[in-house]
Amino acid sequence: MEVNKNITMWEEHLDKKYGKKGTKTRSEYEKGFETFKIGVLIAEARKKQNLTQQQLAEKIGTTKNYISRIENDASDIRLSTLIRIIKDGLGGNLKISFE
């Protein structure tokens, strides 16, 4: 198999752009990326259930604007709110793991 020497591996890209794992800049990037992923997962689950942001907001007692901000990574989310969104809004369960 021929390897394209112009392709950069993802970890190499992150090392160049944000520094090696454990550096302040890289840690800040990784924290932001985790928040972004949560918003994307909520949006995907909501759409899979054919819910609008307004409908999800009403199910958990918040505003459409707040759901939009979470999904678009513009707002930090409290754990209690995340649990309400997943359990009450989407009918799921939250699983947390540490690495």
Image (cartoon, grey):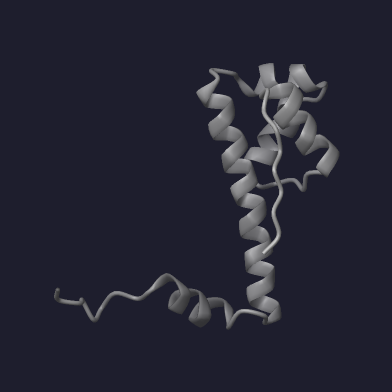
| 80 vs 76: above or below | above
Q: Residue at x 68, y 23 (%)?
A: 91
In this view, the residue in front, 72 or 91, is 91
Q: Position of residue 93 (x, y in %)?
A: 70, 33
Residue 65: x, y in percent?
72, 30
Report if residue 65 is visible in the image. Answer: no
Q: Residue at x 85, y 38 (%)?
A: 80
Image quadrant containing the N terminus: bottom left
Q: Is residue 34 visible?
A: yes
Q: Residue 12 vs residue 36: left or right?
A: left
Residue 21 vertical position relative to residue 10 in the rendered view, above or below: below
* Residue at the image position 66 percent from the left and 59 percent from the top: 32
Residue 44 image point, x, y percent: 53, 33
Q: What is the number of callouts on the image?
A: 0
Residue drawn where x is 57% and y is 77% of the image: 18
Q: Residue lying farthest left?
A: 1
Q: Quadrant of residue 98?
A: bottom right
Dividing the image into 4 quarters, which one contains the C terminus?
A: bottom right
Which of the 4 image quarters holds residue 55?
top right
On screen, 70 above or below 97? above
- Looking at the image, residue 14 sits to the left or right of residue 95; the answer is left
Instruction: Tell me where residue 7 appears, x and y as whole percent.
Output: 29, 74
* Picture layout, residue 92 above or below residue 74: above
Q: Is residue 49 left or right of residue 70?
A: left
Camera-side residue of 34 and 65: 34
